Image (cartoon, rainbow, N blue to C red):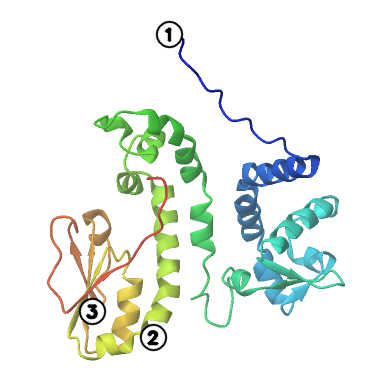
Amino acid sequence: MAQNHSAPPMMATASSAELLQAQAELWCHAMAYLKSMALQSVIKLGIPTAIHRCGGAASLSELRAHLPVPASKLPCLSRLMKLLVTSGVFGESEAGAYSLTPVSRLLVEDDAEGSRTCLSPFAILASSPFHHRSSQRLPEWLEKEEGDAAAETPFMMAHGAGFYGYVGRDSEFGALFNEAMAADSRVTAQVVVRECGEVFAGSASLVDVGGGDGTMAKAIARAFPHVRCTVLELPQLAGNMPADGMVEFVAGDMMEFIPPADVVLLKVRMTMIE
């Protein structure tokens, strides 16, 4: 008996407008990495800081005196700035002056707060080639069977070591990572100290798990001197931290042991394709 194979349903034919809209959206997704590259570029050129030094708003011609960009490249820089304006990183007046937004204020390196709210190192790390190379291995990693030690993560496939192993092995990446985490902790610490005082009021001890160079723990210790603060970090970092009497560094692995304390601080670090 012949089997009745029903034909798959026909896809509705898209109108010209729908087709062009879909094409435009696909372009946006495929080229989305250019936003992070544009952000990295303006940070490395010092544009947010230059706008800040110009009083918070400046045209390209006014910025030129502060930037290492030749006049012949200003039209290209203008297009880059337009992209970041549409992304909300900068504002733009009708007269063509670029201004800082809450986002780009986090990229100013010489603000009145002594750069305590500058997240430029974090943005540079997030857009670095170290992570881009990892993301390029994602399709290959998804095809791998479980149990392949060399392909445990896309990061390991790209760099030959796990994320934290690579941090300890590569001095450039390690310095970049530590600077980024310290910058992020400075910003977070301001909010924690300002908004979470009741948590520490009745506490005598705190351990910051994976607390890096102690930026967060030191901010809490300064704000709440009665709290004894400890930082648990991997031996390669904890062993190199100077003793300043403000916080105590303990070498160890949080998966094996966490020192007892009234408050255990476990921050969510940046999530990459590790």
> Which of pointers 2 and 3 indicates the residue nearer the eye?
2
Tell me if mark 2 has few (under 14), some (14-19) or many (20+) residues whose alpha carbon lies within 10 angstroms of its own: few
Alpha carbon distance from label 2 to label 3: 26 Å
Looking at the image, residue 45 sits to the left or right of residue 222; the answer is: right
Q: Residue 227: x, y in percent? A: 22, 85
Instruction: Compare marks 3 and 1 and give the one earlier in the sequence.
Output: 1
Depth order, front residue of 193/110: 193
> Which of pointers 3 and 1 indicates the residue nearer the eye?
1
**Residue positioned 81% across, 71% down in the render:** 97
Of all residues, the one furthest to the front in this rendering is: 1
Quarter assignment of residue 22: top right
Instruction: Compare marks 1 and 2 and give the one earlier in the sequence.
Output: 1
Alpha carbon distance from label 1 to label 2: 75 Å
SS for callout 3:
loop
Location of the N terminus (image quadrant): top left
SS for callout 1:
loop
Q: What residue type is disc 1 on?
A: Met
Which dot marks residue 195? 2
Instruction: Tell me the residue that label 1 is attached to.
Output: 1
Of all residues, the one furthest to the right in this rendering is: 95
**Residue positioned 65% across, 63% down in the render:** 46
Q: Residue 205: x, y in percent? A: 18, 81
Q: Is residue 257 above or below residue 24?
A: below
Q: What residue type is disc 3 on?
A: Gly
Instruction: Tell me the residue that label 3 is attached to.
Output: 245
Looking at the image, residue 99 sits to the left or right of residue 32; the answer is: right
> Which of pointers 1 and 2 indicates the residue nearer the eye?
1
Depth order, front residue of 13/196: 13
Q: What residue type is disc 2 on?
A: Glu
